[in-house]
Every structure is written in structure tokens, then in C-alpha cells.
Amino acid sequence: MKQVLLERYGQPEEGVRCAEVPDLGAPAAGEVVFDVLAFPINPADISMCRGTYRLRPSLPATPGAECVGRVTAVGAGVSHVQPGDLVINLQRENWAQRRRVKGDDVIAIPPSTDLLQAAMIRINPPNQTLVGFILGRGLAKRSLAEIRAIYADLGEQVRKGVLLAPVEKVYPIEEIKAAVAHAQQGERSGKILVAPNGAPR
């Protein structure tokens, strides 16, 4: 399978490459295996590739913090998802073609939702305050049931068109260098996505 590797910190598109790595195999008890349909390249990912993010893993590493995928197999003891379910994963090391994670790390999305992305809201001064927010810390205060409910609600709002998340371009994983370079450009019309298994539908 294919996976994105960050091999050196610095200019992001120079430090990443698409590598062939062994397939994950069958899931163990409590694990879920899913094929990644798409992942975004977020500002935090670019910062991590530069070596300026709050997390600086030893290299080589796989950057990225979120993706959407489809379950291919579940291990014993996993009951909240099944093969064919569309899921999101919020753990690190997601820039791969296939993932194997603990069952509780994935959250099911309503079947009618194709892709789930965060909405971007512009703050327009004066008389408004911008407060920093780290998703992981916010979610850590909530139960798994509450997190699932949050993402189910977001997925429904995306499906209804209440939340919009435009996409400017979708790249194949083999073009990760071009995708990372594109994600650093200003004045874009939407997100930059990478589709490891072909264009998502």
C-alpha cells in the first residue's frame, strides 16, 4: 500500500514523499481496518512538516490528523461499525492508503454524507474576539458517545448544505509533493484533498 512519509523538516513539499509500505493485514481484536477515501492538508499539517508545530515526532513520520474512509474489516469486540460503513478517524498517522486503528478511534458518519470537513469561518473585527482552540483538547473533555453525536450532527449539516466546505482540488497520493505545495498557496477557493484510492464519490 501507499503511505506519505515526512523524512526531513523544512520546506514541506521537499520533505514528504509517497512510499510503498507493507499492507496492514487483518485487524486484531478491538481494531478496525479501513481504506482511506480522502484526507485534507491542513495548516497544522504544513506546520508539522516545517518542524514548527507543537508536536515534533522523530523522523520518518506520517503527518496528518484526520481522514474519511470506508471500513473493510473489523476485529472481535467491535460492534459500533461494520464493513462498508463510512467513518472518520481523528488520530495521527493518517496519510496512508489503508488504516488499522482501535475500534473506538473511528466514528461512523451518516451513509448519505460523502465527505466531512471542517467549516471555515472568517472573523471580521471590530468588537469580536478570536480565541485559540485545539480540537483534541476540546474532544478529550467529552465522552465517546458525545463525540459521535457531534460528528453525526456535523455530517447531517454538511448533507443538508447548512455547512459548506468547498474543495479546490483533489490530488492522487502519488502527487503528495504537488498537493502540499498547493496547500500553502493563499487566496484559494477551498480545501486541498488527497485521495489515496482514486477520486472519492
Image (cartoon, rainbow, N blue to C red):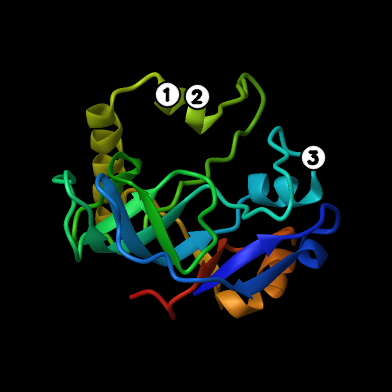
Which of the labelled discs sits on residue 137, or is there none? 2
Q: How many marks?
A: 3
Q: Residue at x 27, y 30 (%)?
A: 144
* Left or right of 36 on screen, residue 14: right
Residue type, mark 2 in image: Arg
Residue to which mark 1 is pinned: 140
Quadrant of the image occupied by residue 33: bottom left
The quadrant where residue 154 appears:
top left
Left or right of 193 in this view: 90? left
| CA distance for labels 3 and 1 | 23 Å
Asked whether 107 or 122 is in front, the reply is 107
Dot 3 or dot 1: first in sequence order is 3
Residue 57 sits above or below residue 195 on the image:
above
Q: Which residue occupies 22% across, 30% down?
A: 145
Question: Tag 3 or tag 2, which sits nearer the N-term?
Answer: 3
Find residue 37 and report its horizontal and vertical position in percent.
Answer: 40, 68
Residue 33 in sight in this render: yes
Secondary structure under the numbered disc 1 in the rendered image: helix
Horizontal and vertical percent position of residue 174: 61, 79
Screen quadrant of the C terminus: bottom left
> In the rendered view, would you say 192 is above or below 132?
below
The residue indicated by pointer 3 is: 52
Task: Identify the amino acid type marked 1.
Answer: Ala
Residue 161 visible (yes or no)? no
Q: Is residue 173 left or right of residue 155?
A: right
Q: Position of residue 9 (x, y in %)?
A: 82, 52
Whether pointer 1 and pointer 2 mark residues with C-beta atoms closer than 8 Å, the reply is yes
Mark 2 to mark 3 CA distance (whole Å): 19 Å
CA gap, disc 1 and disc 2 = 5 Å
Q: Amino acid at mark 3?
A: Thr
